[in-house]
Amino acid sequence: MLSYTEENYLKALLKLSFQNEERPEAGTNEMAAYLGVKPATATDMLKKLKEKDLVTYKKYGKILLTESGKKNGIAILRKHRLWETFLYEKLDFSWDEVHEVAEQLEHIQSAKLVDKLEEFLGFPEFDPHGDPIPKANGEIPATAKTLLSEMKAGQTCKVAAVKDTSTLFLQYLEKLHITIGTTLKVIEVIAFDGSLSIQIENEEPRSISMKFAESLFVQS
Amino acid sequence: MLSYTEENYLKALLKLSFQNEERPEAGTNEMAAYLGVKPATATDMLKKLKEKDLVTYKKYGKILLTESGKKNGIAILRKHRLWETFLYEKLDFSWDEVHEVAEQLEHIQSAKLVDKLEEFLGFPEFDPHGDPIPKANGEIPATAKTLLSEMKAGQTCKVAAVKDTSTLFLQYLEKLHITIGTTLKVIEVIAFDGSLSIQIENEEPRSISMKFAESLFVQS
DNA sequence: TATGAAAGTTAGACTAACCTAACAAATATA
DNA sequence: TATATTTGTTAGGTTAGTCTAACTTTCATA
């Protein structure tokens, strides 16, 4: 049985490994920063996780999840994303409100609960942010990797997922009526600053920044 | 903000106060036994709760919830019973499985979550065990107080709530096809041992023990 | 009403998760 | 390559919640 905190370390490591596929290992400071604790605290916990064979860890070395650690981490991510979906779909939470509550709900211990919840939601493949929901067996559905910023003028695409899940960005998306599945047409690409002119569904074209275009995954 | 443990102490005290309306106060040992900790541990925590003005506590004295403590306790009970209802109604959990998971879910912090959940469930007044679900304002719906054992031969009633929520009893009820709302007719009362012969809906009459009859609340 | 049992408290210790301050290793760069 | 910066570790301390063992108060009853 893993503690609340141990689970958070595993999830953090998993998320960090997703952020950079080529380099799935993380450093102590990186972990600490991600979790909002001091590096000394992370060092202690990493030793403990190593004892439990959840991570590979050597003094001054990089940290990597073991098979067991990965399995556990994925299980937590699965719960997190299923709960996010529940909050969004069934309880009418907005895009930017689901994360905080799901952070708590993901630690509820009950195998039956997760599986029943998944069934209740109709076995969704993606959460409200477009992130893939791991299956009970640990499989993770394939996901779009194309950024809106990679699109060329004239191309049409659909919003597949958000890369940046900060409240500010999510609220901005809501204001623009952009959600998962929204159709976007790239009207013009401004070479000068990487900004784009896009058409959201059938609305008037509007300009968005490069930062914005690099924060949305799309599917053409 | 209350800790997980503090919340459990408040809920325990509230439940103990319901068990005996005339005597809403509890003792240290009683609390400790209920929570599965040692009396010394309870003493420590009670001092802490007193500092926070959640209970009235004096050395060697009885313990009582303050207004604030009661309000907090009721809020937790509300969450517990709403989650139980969710698990039973929406996720197909059985009568005896809901409690354990709800014990965890009741500690999730989000005012919005509770209220949205209540709305999603259609503002239920009673949980799967027939216990009243406190409203957002702290009001607790009135509840049946008549025990099946108080019924006389010939009387008909409906099951309103279970007094004993032990797994063994709940599973036995399921086996007998008794649930909240089931109609029971008392055929005969055996003076010798307090056992009853009852008819469950339209099934053949069967005999139940006094212990059984004292564990079910009914409404005539 | 004196006294032994029951109920409750205190003192001291442990663990998990955190911290700060000081130090050590690794890495980047002048 | 020597050194400064970054990264990571160690040592020692804190808090919440728990424990055991010894002690004190209260209460029931002989």
Image (cartoon, coloured by chain):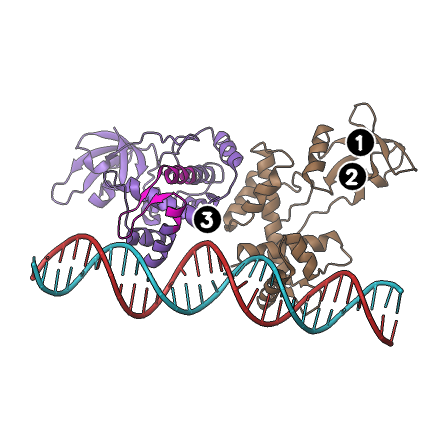
Chain colours: A purple, B brown, C red, D cyan
Question: Does residue B73 belong to the magenta stretch?
Answer: no
Q: Which residue is mark 3?
A: A4
Q: CA distance from mark 3 to mark 1?
A: 46 Å
Circle 1 marks a residue in which chain? B
> Are dots 1 and 2 in contact, CB under 8 Å?
yes
Out of B45 and B54, give the one closest to the viewer.
B45
Q: Which residue is mark 1?
A: B184
Q: CA distance from mark 1 to mark 2?
A: 9 Å
Question: Does residue A66 belong to the magenta stretch?
Answer: yes
Q: Secondary structure at mark 3?
A: helix
Picture quadrant of residue A183: top left
Residue at position x 38%, y 43% from top? A54
Percent across and percent down for residue A189 are 16, 38
- The kind of residue tagged 3 is Tyr
Out of B170 and A117, give the one closest to the viewer.
B170
Percent across and percent down for residue A188 are 17, 36
Q: Which residues are magenta?
A: A48-77
- The kind of residue tagged 1 is Leu
Identify whether B177 is placed above or below D30: above
Quarter the C terminus of chain A occupies: top left
Left/right placement of residue B163 relative to residue B98 reads right
Q: Which residue is mark 2?
A: B218
- The kind of residue tagged 2 is Val
